[in-house]
Image (tube, helix red, strand yellow):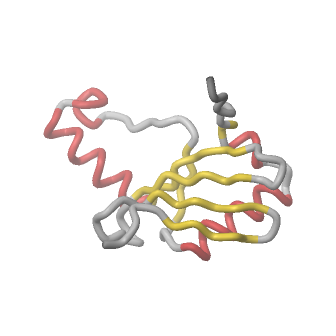
Amino acid sequence: MDKPYTIIQHNDYELTIYNGIAPLDPNNDNVDVEVTFPNGDSFSVVFFTLQNIETLMKQYKKTGECADGLYFWTSDMVIVQQLSKKTICATIDKLLAEDEFESVFSKNEKSTEI
């Protein structure tokens, strides 16, 4: 059985892609992504494809969510043309290089054991 996540060591960070157990559709899907740096700081965001947002909005018309599909929103979102490890890593690298990473990703609280 495949794991519901993929861990990639990339440049100066570890990337965890939570792809779930269903096969990932690179053109119409979304995935939670966590980036962990060597100092232990971790950040999260959700990567969506444009097609996936359209699909979700059509579903919302049927379910009544978001004013019957009038709008779509989520915090900590990155929209890409296609979901792939290469695209996700390239996007993160560019956000880090442009000093935009912390504006897009949310910092995760460090867990403390009791």
* Residue 8 image-quadrant placement: bottom right
Looking at the image, which residue sits at the far bottom? 86
Residue occupying the far top of the picture: 114
Tell me how many marks there are. 0
Left or right? Give the position of 103 relative to 21.
Answer: right
Residue appearing at x 45%, y 36% in the figure:
73
> Residue 68 appears in which quarter of the rendering?
top left
Eyeballing the image, is 96 above or below 2? Answer: above
Left or right placement of residue 12 versus residue 48 in this view: right
Q: Image point 76% across, 48% down: which residue?
A: 101
Quadrant in which the C terminus appears: top right
Seen at 66% across and 68% down, the residue is: 89
Assign the N terminus to one quadrant of the image: bottom left
Residue lying farthest front?
114
The image quadrant of residue 27 is bottom left
Residue 40 rendering spot, x and y as whole percentages: 77, 46
Closer-to-camera residue (3/85)? 3
Q: Is residue 23 above or below residue 48?
A: below
Q: State the residue in front, 70 or 5.
A: 5
> Percent from the top left, x then y, of residue 44?
61, 45
Q: Position of residue 60 (x, y in %)?
A: 23, 39
Q: x and y percent of residue 91 in the render?
A: 68, 64
Q: Does residue 108 appear to the left or right of 48 in the view shown?
A: right
